[in-house]
Image: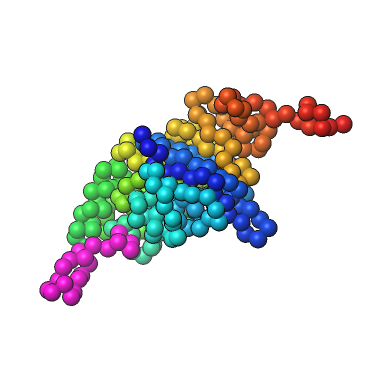
Amino acid sequence: MTTILSARGLVKRYGHVTAIDGADFDLEPGEVLAVVGDNGAGKSSMIKALSGALVPDAGEIRVDGELVHFRTPLDARRVGIETVYQDLALSPAQDIASNMFLGREIRRTGPLRLIRKLDTAKMRGEAQRVLDELDIKIKSITQPVETLSGGQRQGVAVARAAAFGTKAVIMDEPTAALGVAESARVLALIDRIRDRGLPVVLISHNMPHVYEIADRIHVHRLGRRVAVVSPKTTTMNQVVGLITGALEVDEHGEVREVESAIHTGLGA
């Protein structure tokens, strides 16, 4: 099967600071790929490049094997890549349906196509269908978003991405500000999106959540991918070692300790 979303040799510099340093990336069909790394590792910059929020200085991005050039997030959305950022990009005073169709409102065709009123009933019906399909429990589709809990707001943002994403959904720390119960519901929601055949990129610092939901783990360090491992064969401590640089993956795909300066004869 063709890789859904891939990147090779991505580079992004800000003056003397290199945020992305020859980064590679691969998202396979129907998987949850977790992206992990320390703060400052460059994973957020890489994800912004993949979602069109940042234009890399070098490298290439492909969707279904076809070369693409994202200049804005709208470019990524046009090919079916939806992103849920930490701030969720929701309008608190508007209702759920309005938020799900924000910027993509459905309008009724008026006389001579000159007057096109919002088709509120159709948007609410479609929004309710998506929420039901993903088993997101909301009291009323007409509720203002500001009346929802943190987990419910996350659910609305994820449902919007799932409704319009046809290639992939990228989620940036979706459980960061949530309690245990609400985090569990968001992870279950990610599972249901995967079950629909839509691959998910999960950026997270929460290793237990990563191990609960991920099919593969992309480890990012110093601006580039240093490993892709399976949570079934790699322990949580090993992944932490890869993140910190204490461990590395050798040419055979085995995780091992990095040789110290003393071991290589460069020390005292």
**Residue 111 among those drawn in magenta:** yes
Secondary structure that dominates the magenta span: loop
Question: Which residue is located at x 63 percent, y 53 percent?
Answer: 18
Please state, as top left, top right, bottom left or bottom right, where the C terminus lies in the image: top right
View extreme (left): residue: 111
The residue lying toward the viewer, choosing from 209 and 148, is 209
**Residue 185 among those drawn in magenta:** no
Question: Which residue is located at x 53 percent, y 34 percent?
Answer: 228
Q: Position of residue 141 (x, y in %)?
A: 27, 55
Question: Which residue is located at x 26 percent, y 53 percent?
Answer: 127
The residue lying toward the viewer, choosing from 95 and 219, is 219
Numbered marks: total: 0
**Along the horizontal axis of the image, is 187 left or right of 58?**
left
Q: Where, by quadrant of the figure, is residue 91 drawn?
A: bottom left
Q: Position of residue 231 (x, y in %)?
A: 50, 29
Report the magenta residues as a range: 101-119
Q: Position of residue 35 (x, y in %)?
A: 51, 41
